[in-house]
Image (cartoon, grey):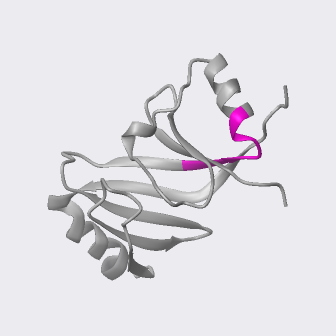
Amino acid sequence: MHEPEFTAGLNIAMKIPKAQYEATVAFYRDTLGFEVKEDDVSYAPTVSRTHSVRFGLNTLWLDCVDNYSQPDLWLQLHTDDLDAATGKLADVGIHPCDEVEPLKNLGSRTHWIKNPAGVVHLLAEQSAE
């Protein structure tokens, strides 16, 4: 079996309760002075609004989730072979949990996974360049 390669993605998502969303966007935009722009959320049915923040080399996504009671942080991983990566992760008890946020029309193959501490990661297949 092919040994999959894992690399860090450039996206970090902060899932924010609706009641704290506006103040959080204002914090990054007005207080810290970061570039913040509202983006389309049609691909993520659990997110009602999103803003992207240029966060150094990363993009921090501020996602408004209407039914959350506390914030949550989600990370992105890339792999060159999603099937091999999923198999390797299954060997250590990490299985896809795509139900956390159904996605559509991303243009790449993906799975949601959780690390042993329960932190959600988007595992996306990215072809070698």
Is 69 part of what is drawn in magenta?
no
Q: Which one is nearer the viewer's eye here, 128 or 74?
A: 128
Residue at horizontal 14%, vertical 60%? 19
Image coordinates of residue 62 in percent, x first then y, are: 36, 64
> Which is more toward the observer, 14 or 88?
88
72 or 56, nearer to the observer: 72
Q: Is residue 109 left or right of residue 62?
A: right
The residue lying furthest to the front in this view is: 105
> Which residue is at 38% across, 46% downward?
101
Left or right: 41 in relation to 60:
left
Residue at horizontal 84 percent and vertical 25 percent from the top = 1
Q: Residue furthest left?
A: 19
75 or 122: nearer the viewer = 122
Residue 78 in the image, given as x and y percentages of width and height? 67, 49
Instruction: Examine the structure image and report whether residue 81 is included in the region drawn in magenta.
Output: yes
Q: Quick check: 1 above or below 109?
A: above
In the figure, 69 relative to 40: above or below? Answer: above
Region rendered in magenta: 76-83
Q: Position of residue 122 (x, y in %)?
A: 54, 46
Residue sitting at x 78%, y 40% = 5
